[in-house]
Image: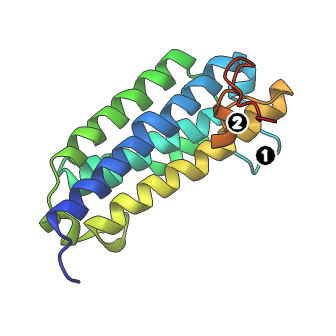
Amino acid sequence: MRRPTAEFTKQFLAQARHSLEKHHLPRVTRCLQMLPDGDIWWRPHPTSNSVGNLVLHLSGNVRQWIISGLGGEPDVRERDKEFEEHGPVPRRALLTRLRATVAEAGRVLAGLSARDLSRKLVIQGYRVTGFQAVFHVTEHFAYHTGQIIFVTKLKRGKDLGFTRLPEQKRKAPSPSVRKTRSV
């Protein structure tokens, strides 16, 4: 694999950090704040995961792949326990863990180089490059954020207002600003 350029590396890692820290984490946080405690641990079916399980899973995945895999910290993940938990782990504890994990991962990402992205690693038994590890984590975080949003919408019965198209964000011009046609 050809090593990515310094500019590509900088942009890719900045986008990965933005995705985790500024886009998905705030949505997960808002969902956790909107759900009653019982709904955080609600499972639609015994083979399904609760929002609480997904938050524990995201924390474990980010720690294993970014903080340990790329950052060199020991891998202490016990993946099965993320799904075996039935709660209630308090909302505050879930948020504290996820926020701290994402912040630590952000620091690791900020210090990576093109060489780090090209490096071959074995994470969770998979042979990947640093680039693939970062891409996996951002994709994985987005996937489970979508599940958390779905459960929150299902349980709250309302649109959470997360998505607005560019034309919906623009304000309509006031009547005094509209152009008039000359006759």
Q: Position of residue 100 (x, y in %)?
A: 34, 28
User: What residue do we see at 52% from left, 39% from top?
Assistant: 24
Up-down relation of residue 37 to residue 78 (above or below):
above
Up-down relation of residue 138 to residue 91 (above or below):
below
Quadrant containing the N terminus in the rendered view: bottom left
- Tell me if residue 77 can be seen: no
Residue type, label 1: Pro
Residue lying farthest to the right in this orientation? 157
Residue matched to label 1: 46
User: What residue do we see at 78% from left, 46% from top?
Assistant: 46
Q: Position of residue 140 (x, y in %)?
A: 51, 55
Query: What kind of element bears circle 2?
Result: helix
Residue lying farthest to the front in this orientation? 183
Give the label, 2 or 1, closer to the camera: 2
Residue type, label 2: Gln
Observer-nearest of 85 and 70? 70
Observer-nearest of 35 and 52? 35
Query: What kind of element bears circle 1?
Result: loop
User: What residue do we see at 25% from left, 63% from top?
Assistant: 8
Residue matched to label 2: 168
Quadrant containing the C terminus in the rendered view: top right
Q: Residues within 10 Å of mark 2 (few under 14, many from 20)?
A: few
* Marks 2/1: CA–CA distance: 39 Å
